[in-house]
Image (cartoon, grey):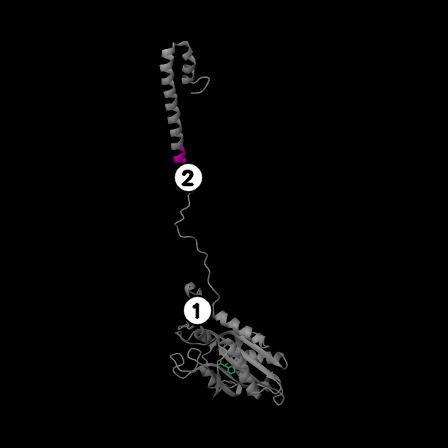
Amino acid sequence: LSRKKGLVSLAVKSLKTLGVEERRILGQQLNQLKNQVENSLSGRKSTLLEQEQKGKFETEGVDVTLPGHAFPSAGIHPLRRVWREMEEISVRMGFTIVSGPEIESDYYNFEALNIPKGHPARDDQDTLFLSDNLLLRTHTSPVQIRTMEKQKPPIRIVVPGRVYRRDAVDATHTPMFHQVEGLVVGEEISLADMKGTLQVFLRALFSHDTRVRLRPSYFPFVEPGAELDISCIFCSGRGCRVCKNSGWIEILGAGMVHPRIFERVGYDPNRYTGFAWGMGIDRIALLKYQVNDLRLFFENDIRFIRQF
Ligand code: PHE
């Protein structure tokens, strides 16, 4: 079809040498032929384009029906959440957050806290010993001693940390768990200050209408010692399955610092008084989030952690 050398074009040019009638017939036929060639060329072109397009879809195409690549995200671990919340409340109340070693000496974990060798209180805390003298701390109370050795009163500290006991693992026991210790020392600090402080703290942690009550108890490093119950956070004290129909839930151990402890760290027990408490973070997380098995906190199943 090309204008200069195409066969059809040449034939069209030679038409003028023919007679009128012949020219008319051949002219028509040449036109038809030209149309035919043009049609089949453009038909072929679009088939080729279509094929090219299809090939691209197959090799470069995106299947929008395939599942996407999910970015794995978890959440703040429930234990860390409670830990931080307790720290925040304590700081608002004027406490300083301190920490101490998880590997302790017998002295700080026991002796200095009025728990000499052979004392029955040692049996309550199945200790993981590393050597005759070194152990994994069974509570955060040794940090009371370490702090008082270094600082003079007034003292207002809170100590969150890991503690260890040789317990068999079940729904309510793990060999490592978490405690928060509190210690206040100053002049004219009373048991009423202890109850008021803990009430403010626990109301911030649980609910503004949480009630507290003290029951006499025994810890060698406090006198008097107490256990503190809060009104059940699920039934507000009416009685339910969680509080075993008592309306109360035991939440921590506390008491006035024993004068012998003050003597040991060089404080004048006639001048200074104070109170201390210790509570379990894990147990509180169980309660707050209504989890029924402590082991879930330590398995790190992302489906569990993602819920918090
Ligand atoms: N250390 C005690 C325990 O682990 C708790 C406690 C702390 C009790 C401070 C009284 C005062 O059982």
The kind of residue on which mark 1 rests is: Phe
Q: Is residue 270 magenta?
A: no
Q: Nearer the viewer, residue 16 or 203?
A: 16
Q: Above or below — where is 200 with respect to 41?
A: below
Identify the residue at the far front of this view.
Answer: 20
Q: Is residue 49 magenta?
A: yes
Q: Secondary structure at mark 1?
A: helix
> Residue 297, image x and y in percent?
44, 69
Residue in view at x 37 percent, y 18 percent: 28
Looking at the image, residue 48 sits to the left or right of residue 102; the answer is left
User: How far apart are the two marked residues, 2 and 1, measured between alpha carbons?
Assistant: 50 Å
List x then y, in percent, for residue 221: 53, 85
Q: Nearer the viewer, residue 53 or 112?
A: 53
Q: Which residues are magenta?
A: 48-57
Q: Which residue is mark 2?
A: 56
Residue 132 visible, this angle: no
Q: Work out whether residue 27 or residue 263 is closer to the camera in this orientation and state it.
A: 27
Q: Residue at x 39, y 38 (%)?
A: 54
Residue 18 in the image: above or below residue 303: above
Quickly name the residue at label 1: 298
Q: Residues within 10 Å of mark 1 (few under 14, many from 20)?
A: few
Question: Alpha-carbon neighbours of circle 2 within 10 Å: few (<14), some, or many (≥20)?
Answer: few
Provide residue 237's location: percent of width, then percent of height.
43, 82
Is the N terminus in the top left, top right, bottom left or bottom right quadrant? Answer: top left
> Residue 205 vs residue 15: left or right?
right
Q: Is residue 238 above or below residue 86?
A: below
